[in-house]
Amino acid sequence: MNASVSKESLDARDRPARLTVGVVGAGRVGPALAASLQLAGHRPVAVSGVSDASVRRAAALLPDVPLVTPAEVLARAELVLLTVPDDALPGLVEGLAETGAVRPGQLIVHTSGRYGTKVLDPALRAGALPLALHPAMTFTGSSVDVQRLAGCSFGVTAPEELRLAAEALVIEMGGEPEWIAEESRPLYHAALALGANHLVTLVAQSMELLQKAGVSAPDRMLGPLLGAALDNALRSGDAALTGPVARGDAGTVAAHVAELRRHAPQAVAGYLAMARTTADRALAHGLLKPEFAEDLLDVLSDSANTKGMNGTDGTDETGPGEAR
C-alpha cells in the first residue's frame, strides 16, 4: 500500500465490539451484508441509495434504517460498507475523502472483487481503516441472501495490522475468510467471473435450446444434470469431463454445430470456443485419445473458419469507419 496504517488509528479497535454500520450503495449486496451484521449484534444506522429498487431493498432488509446521503452515512457509522459497482468505487472513495466525510478510526470496507485495499488509499490517508471483503456469492437482493452467507467464502485483503478485524467481520457474517494478495485481486475476480457469470449465460442458452427442442420443463431436466456436473467438477476437476468432445466424437460435434447454426446461430461461437477449450484440456489430461483428437479438432477448426464467430457467413458487414 502507498500509505501506512497509523498507530493512532488502530486504537479504534479498542472501541466496543458492537459497531454502528452504514451502507453506501443499496444494491443487492450492501443491505444483505448489513442485515447479516445486524444479526451478529451490530447496529445499522444509515443507508444510501438512488434507484427505486435500492430504496425497496433497503426497506425490506433494513427496516427503520434511514435513507440518507453518502456523506451522512459516513457521519453516522463507525463501519461503512461501500457496495457500489467496481467502476464507481475509485471516484466514490476519492470524493468522500476530499470532502472530509471520512473520519479517523472509521472502518471503510468495500466489497469489490476486482480491487484490494489500494483503492481505499484516499480514505486511509484521512485516517480510516481499509478492508476489502468480497463475498464469493451471487446475490438476489432478498432476505435469502442473508441465509446464503452461511459458509460463503470471502476474498479478503487488508493490512496485516487489521487481519484479525477482517477475519472477525467475515466470521460474524457467517462466512469463511480467504486471503487474497493485493496484486492477485484482478486474477481472483476474473476466475470467479469466468466460473459464475458465464455459467449463467450457458445455462440460460441451454434452457432456450431445450425449449426449442420441445422440452416442457428445461429447468427440471437440467437441474440434476448440471448439479451433478458441478459437483463432479469441484471434486475431480478435469477428470470429471464427459460428453462427445471428451470422447472425441467428431461426427456428433459436427451435428451439434449444424443444428445450432439452424436454430440458434448466436450460440455457435460460444459452443465452438468451449468445445475447443474442453478438447485441449481433455488432451492435456489424457482423457481424449490422440487418434480421436485429430478429427475432432478438424471439425472445430473447419466450423470456426467456415462461419463467422457470430454464426453468420464470416463476411464483414460493417462499412468503413463503422463501429464493430
Image: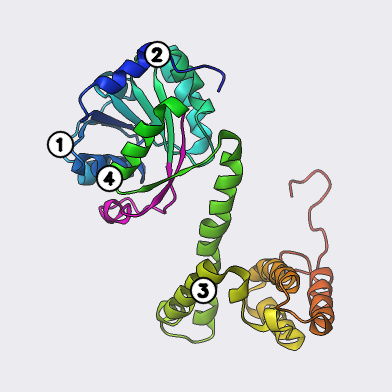
Q: Taking 151 as reference, is 264 left or right?
A: right
Q: Neighbour class for label 1 at 10 Å: few (<14), some, many (≥20)?
A: few
- Alpha-carbon distance for marks 2 and 4? 38 Å
Q: Specify the label residue 57 is tagged with.
A: 4
Q: Earlier in the sequence, mark 1 or mark 4?
A: 4
Nearer the camera: disc 3 or disc 1: 3
Nearer the camera: disc 2 or disc 4: 2
Q: Which residues lie in the magenta part?
A: 134-159
Q: Nearer the viewer, residue 312 or 37?
A: 37
Name which residue type carries label 4.
Arg
Residue bearing mark 2 = 7
Q: Are marks 3 and 1 in contact (CB under 8 Å)?
A: no
Q: From what the image shows, is residue 15 above or below residue 167?
A: above
Q: Earlier in the sequence, mark 3 or mark 1?
A: 1
Q: Earlier in the sequence, mark 3 or mark 2?
A: 2
Q: Are marks 2 and 4 in contact (CB under 8 Å)?
A: no
Residue bearing mark 1 = 64
* Residue depicted at x 77% and y 82%: 289
- Alpha-carbon distance for marks 3 and 4? 36 Å
